[in-house]
Image: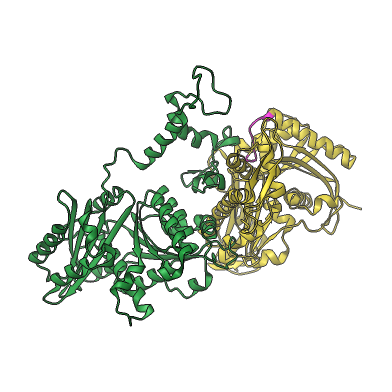
Chain colours: A yellow, B green
Amino acid sequence: MSDYPPIVALELGTTKARCVVAEIRDDDHLMILGVGECESRGIRKSEVINLDTAISCVKIAIDNAEESANAILKEVYLMASGGSIQSLVNRGSIPIMSDDHEIIREDINHVIQTARNLSLSDERQILHSICQHFYVDDQKGITNPEGMEGYKLSVDMLIIHGLVGRLRNLVRAARSASVEVVNIAYGGLCAALATLTPEDKHSGCMVIDLGGGTTDFIAYADNAIATAGSLAIGGDHVTNDISSGLRISSATAEKLKIEAGSAVVNLPQRMNKLPIPDDPGSSARVVRYGDLHTIIHARMEELFQLVRGQVKQKDLLHRLGSGIILTGGGANLTGVTELGEKVFGLPCRVGRPRDVSGFTSVINMPDYAAPLGLLRFAARDVKSHASAPGIRGWIKGLLGFRSAS
Amino acid sequence: MNLNVDQDYLFGKTEVPQRSRVLVLGIGGAGGNMVRRMAARWPNGGPDVAVVDTDPQSLAVCPVNPSLLLGELTTQRLSSGSDTEAGRMAAEESIGRLEPILVGYDLVFLVCGMGGGTGTGAAPVIADYLHKLETLTLCFAAMPFGFEGDRRARTAADGVRTLQDKCDAVIVLPNEKLIDLLEPQTGLESSFRISDDHVATCIYALWKLLSRPGVINLDFADVRKLVERSGGLCSFGHGSGQGKTRSADAIRTLLSSPWLEQGAVLGHAASLMINILGGPDMTLADVQGVIGEITAKAPKGIHLFVGASVDGDWRDRLAITVLTAEQWRDPVISRDEADEIVTDYLDNLEPPQEGRESAPSAGAVGLKTPVQSDLPLEKVTGEGRGRFSAAEPTIINGQDIDIPTYLRRGLKLSFER
């Protein structure tokens, strides 16, 4: 059925560790073969804070996935997120030296290498370098300059990079669970790969992946990724705010958020009472919907405003014709698209993974957009044999855990 | 925004940097109308203006910029419907978006009508937020007319009390008293305009005073002092005159001003700020005469602040504005400290029961040591961070984002009110 071996995506999320096994069909359709999950421990804001507990979670998720897919997993693609991830645009230029000044494939590869060649500080590692647009003699917005004539060829590359130490800890946790990491991809990019249609990318849009510990965002304009970034704010913050405001345990706060939470305050409902299930050690009581929703609204609005600030700074807001696409667990929150529309002044919808089949319970959930997108990233990576050396080499170069076999 | 500064540039005058930034914010329908009419009176520059309302229709026709719709989701763009609670919630919803409008000012005048939904409900929320920004806040609260009914009057009175806690000072404008002043045939629109004129001139005079040095200078610290020690309630009066008899006319209209109860308010004032605004032709005798006559009405030993400034465009014209408070409280401690001490005092209260030696029951207000005065600080840095206390803090724009947003925005939950 497929020429390629099954691929495995591993996410060490703040709420859950997830492992998904899939097969790529030739038409790029993904067939899910198995899924494994485990409640996360030892992860805060998408970063490892306790390696031992994180490893045990990864092990359980992988074991579950192996059982579910009936296969032994050896190699995984790993998702990276967290507040340390940033992006920047780097422009590279080369002169076209040939006599006829025609731009050939080699020139394009050369200019891409030049733009990629960017010296970041030692503590930062490039995750992705993505081609945005070419310029031929300052003519803007060229997608493929091959065959054109000019004296100078330039390219804008979007460089997505993260802190070495944080990435290393993620790789370490995966390796300690006896799997090798083939490649790492940024969570926001994954969420976009899973949910966006070609039209979305063309007319411009932004994907916001509302995770447990972090919020990743990635904006497309004119068919290219214009900016990407990550904020260390997520669903955990909402839960913590509820727990602190209503003086209830985190577990109860999480339950309230999922069952009765809303990102907008509902005027008629606000004085209605909501019974709180008994916390061990405290008696049952009631809270008002208005209070719960006020707390959630304040946090989510602030989060959206911070993301909006980031894209506004890059002057992108008016270029997002297809609006905002929300993924991640936070996209399940009632009223979240309504709030998004208000803050961004753009249409806002929940993103669902496309072109995936099998495990229907999983593939329709916005929570799974990023891991399924990671599979799509992996599928591309497997097919394009000329994969960028950068991060793969870096992973292999990591010593001291398991030898890269 | 400020055209005057540009003109100074054009004509090569010495540039005087603006010393204090002043914003006039209209809240709700009445406030928006007042600010709209005021802004029209300052074509040559004045304080910055802004309007917020829950009613998209009235905002749409309001030329004031910037303007912001409050509570888009709370009220579903249907205005507050005279529901104070809805006004409050709308402001809470939108307080985050108000920030860019409010930040960077030294003095903010809130202008609102009391007794309805938006002004009464939203003004305290906004004032509370300004307090967090440490901005001096003065609120002009227009009270409803008698014919608007008892319920509205009660809502308005409650609203003023709430505002007094939140603002540095509230200046109550009893619109009812306007009726005494007006000719019976005065049109409705022009009656309101007269009231607006008074408020507009007062604000303009204060702005003029604060934005550039006057001939007899009063500065921001003086205004702050008067307002902060006023105990939360101020009165103001305004009078103006033209021609040869301008000072006499100005004094006469000031003393007959309905806001000063025909001058009676001056009789029991504890502090008084007199600000005279005139043209280049204003004489020392004018100033001396005006101040002498007004202070003669006031008790001896009053805390007096006097200022005079000249507006180049004025000819043969004189305006007096008076800001006065019945109280003068010497501050022992700042407001924040006061809050803290009250909390500590409550925390340290012993239960009024017998057997003080026996340990207080769990959950009851216990005997606490004075060390507890650190409690509010701990609450912010430790408790609010909750589960993130172990993780690296997320600091954005100088704010610790791990602390709940509603706490940072000063939103009150229903059981805390």
Q: Residue furthest bottom?
A: B185
Question: Left of A368 or right of it: where is B417?
Answer: left
Image location (x, y in percent) of residue B250: 18, 70
Q: Quadrant of residue B235?
A: bottom left
Q: In terms of depth relative to the viewer, which is nearer, B112 or A386?
A: B112
Tell which of B76 and A228 is nearer to you. Answer: B76
At 92% from the left edge and 53% from the top edge, which residue is drawn? A1
Q: State whether residue B42 appears in this view.
A: no
The answer to whether residue B252 is left or right of residue A54 is left
- The spot of residue A303 in percent (x, y) is 57, 51
A91 or B178, nearer to the observer:
B178
Task: Look at the image and tell me in which quarter the C terminus of chain A lies.
Answer: top right
Residue lying furthest top in this view?
Answer: B357
Quick check: A258 above or below B355? Answer: below
Q: Nearer the viewer, residue B134 or A28?
A: B134
Is residue A161 located in the magenta-colored stretch of the structure? Answer: no
Q: Residue at x 83, y 40 (%)?
A: A65
Vertical side of B14 occupied by A379: above or below: above
What stretch of residues is rendered in magenta? Answer: A45-51
Q: Residue at x 44, y 30 (%)?
A: B374
Image spot of residue A261 (x, y percent): 67, 50
For residue A223, side relative to residue B238 (left or right)? right
Please identify the residue farthest to the right as the structure is shown: A1
Please check the rendered image and state whether residue A49 is part of the magenta-colored stretch, yes or no: yes
Image position of A122 with respect to B152: above or below: above
